[in-house]
Image: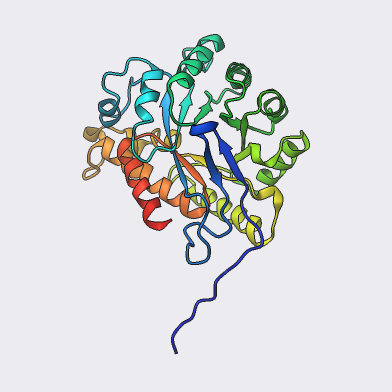
Amino acid sequence: MAFKRASQKFNAAINTVTIGTGDKALAIGGANAYPFYKFDSVSPNPARIGIEILDTGLAGEPAGVCAFYEGCSTVAEMAAKACTLEGVDFVCIRFASADPGDANTPVETCVEIAKAVAAVATKPLAIAGCKNMEKDTALFSAIAEALSGQNIMFLSAKEEDYKTMSASVGLAYGHIIGAESACDINLAKQLNVLISQMGLKNDKVVANVGSAAAGYGFEYVSSTMERVRSAALAQNDTMLQTPVVTPVASETWGVKESILPEEDAPKGWGPAEDRGIRMEIATATAVLASGSDAVILKHPTSVATISKLIASLA
């Protein structure tokens, strides 16, 4: 007797969040089936790809990244070039130099960089900080004001600063905020509840429910994403129907497999850049299969590979 698979239908869907405005508007989310289950339902929006650019420029970046941005001398020029890369849906500027433990770039300088990027970018923007909460809060608030009305995605808001982020970035200037929690479905739901209580509508919130490079406690990432997606669709949990955006680049390009020089690596590991690309691709593939609606990558080769994967499975 031939196997006949029953279609799995849900009376729920992931929220649709639009970043950018006008011709640059991009919808994320909207799915009402599990990732790549096109035999159950075709998502209105495919998984999206963002490309990360550091405000520190190309110092220390892989050769392939440097080659792609050859001739670019400013962050704005890099952003403009990134918008031309096939497969890129949005551009994420990470203000790593703002870290007080690093260059401690003033907020005012970062704002000018963000304004220059916004003036030339033909794709919607995301803004990421230096992971110093106090500096990031001040930075995000200032950039949100300077780019008011441009519907930019800010990554991220945590339990410690969600009130400031919701008020000064979302409510005051109409931007989108990312709710960041650490691989725990209960923490992810709680943060979404708290943000909603601030008055932010569900079409102004995305989530990073946890991220890590493949092999680095990644089972917690994938299991959390799977549980979140299952609760959102099968249980119609409205507080977990937030689109998930996962910053893959910042996790994968800092682990030893990606940065250890070939001469110092175990025999057979090969060139560091090739390892970094494989780590980025493997991690992005895994989080997309687990329930992420968008990934943020760095290397052009990774973008090309993941773009083909999404197109072939969407």
- In this view, the residue farthest toward the bottom is 1
Q: Foreground: 314 or 35?
A: 314
Image position of 165 (left or right of 104) = right
Q: Position of residue 250 (x, y in %)?
A: 44, 33
The residue at 51%/10% (across/down) is 109
Place residue 207 in its image quadrant. top right
Place residue 165 in its image quadrant. top right
Q: Foreground: 237 or 150?
A: 150
Image position of 86 (left or right of 167) = left
Locate the N terminus by quadrant. bottom left
Q: For residue 183, say whether it is visible.
A: yes
Q: For residue 104, say whether it is visible.
A: no
- In this view, the residue farthest toward the front is 22
Image position of 266 (left or right of 193) = left
Q: Position of residue 76 (x, y in %)?
A: 41, 19
The residue at 32%/36% (across/down) is 300
Q: Position of residue 212 (x, y in %)?
A: 48, 42
Image position of 133 (left or right of 64) = right
Q: Position of residue 37 (x, y in %)?
A: 49, 62
Image height of 37 relative to 65, above or below: below
The residue at 28%/28% (across/down) is 68
The way the protein has been coloured in the rendering is rainbow
Q: How many marks?
A: 0
Q: Foreground: 134 or 80?
A: 80
The residue at 30%/33% (across/down) is 260
Locate the C terminus by quadrant. bottom left
